[in-house]
Image (spheres, rainbow, N blue to C red):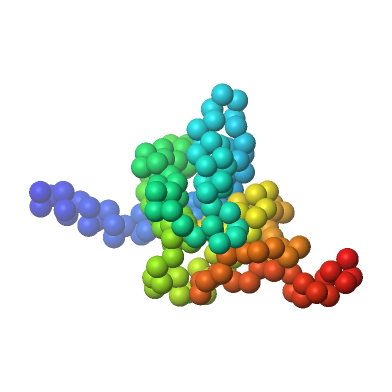
Amino acid sequence: MRGVIDTLCAFKMNPGFIFWSTTGFVIATVFASFFEWTLHRFVMHKPVGNFRYPYETHALVHHRVFRADESYHLIDANDAMTIPMAWWNGPVLVLIGQLPFLAVSLFSGHWSLLCGSTAACAAYYGAYEYIHWCMHLPRKRNVERSGIFFRLNGHHLLHHRYMNKNFNVVMPLADLLLGTLLMRSPVHFQQARGPSVPDVQPRQPAASHAATA
C-alpha cells in the first residue's frame, strides 16, 4: 500500500502530469459546452432514427411539464423525477465524451490528458444536473443567490419558451458561437417569476410595443 501511495504522489508531482491534465481539463470544459449543445439540439429535441428515448423523455415529457410560465418551477411533486436524466445517462455521456481525448492520449502517449478531460466532463455533467435541478426546483440555496446562476436561469427559461434557442445550461459558449443565443424574448409573454429568475421580456414596455406593432 505504501508503494502505491508513493507512486501516486510522485505521479501527481510530475510537472508533465500537471501540465497535460490541466490542458485536458481546460480543453474538455470548452468541448463539453459544444457536446452539450449538440446532444441537446440534435438528440434531445429530435428523434434519431428509431432511437427516440432522449427525445421522448426530454422534448415530449420534460418540456410538457416545465414551460416558461409559472410551471417553469415544479408544481406537482410527482413530476420531480422528470427534471434529472436517468442515473445511467451520466456515466454513458462522460464515456462518450472521452472518445476524442482517448484517441489523442493513445496517439501522444500523454495519458494525463485523459485524466484531466475525464474530470472536466464529469464535473460539467454534475454541474448540469445540479443547476438544472435548482432552476426547476428552487429552494433559496446559496448557488441560487449568485449572479451567474441568475443569468443562466434566464438563459434556460428562454429555452423553455423557444426550444430552438439556448441549448446550453452550464456554459453558453456554444450558443454564442453557433448562433442560438437569445438574451431576451422578442415578444412579451407570461413568464415565471422568482428571486433567482431575471426578467427576460423585451426592453420595450408592452404598451408601447403594442402601439408600434
> Is residue 16 something one can see in this rendering?
no
Is 165 left, or right, of 19 in this rendering? right
Question: Who's the residue at 43% across and 53% down the image?
Answer: 76
Q: Residue furthest left?
A: 1
Q: Nearer the viewer, residue 187 or 91?
A: 187
> Is residue 79 something one can see in this rendering?
yes
Q: Residue furthest front?
A: 76
Is 185 left, or right, of 30 in this rendering? right
Q: Nearer the viewer, residue 60 or 159?
A: 60
164 w.r.t. 213: above or below: above
Q: Picture coordinates of residue 87 (x, y %)?
A: 36, 42
Number of numbered discs visible in the structure rendering: 0
Picture quarter with the C terminus: bottom right
102 w.r.t. 21: above or below: above
165 w.r.t. 90: above or below: below
Q: Residue furthest top?
A: 50
Question: Who's the residue at 59% across and 71% down the image?
Answer: 198
Q: Picture coordinates of residue 110 (x, y %)?
A: 41, 45
Q: Picture coordinates of residue 167 (x, y %)?
A: 60, 51
Question: Who's the residue at 39% across and 53% down the image?
Answer: 77
Q: Nearer the viewer, residue 35 or 127?
A: 127
Question: Who's the residue at 37% across and 39% down the image?
Answer: 88
Q: Quadrant location of residue 205?
A: bottom right
Q: Picture coordinates of residue 184 (x, y %)?
A: 70, 66
Q: Residue furthest right?
A: 212
Is 134 left, or right, of 209 in this rendering? left
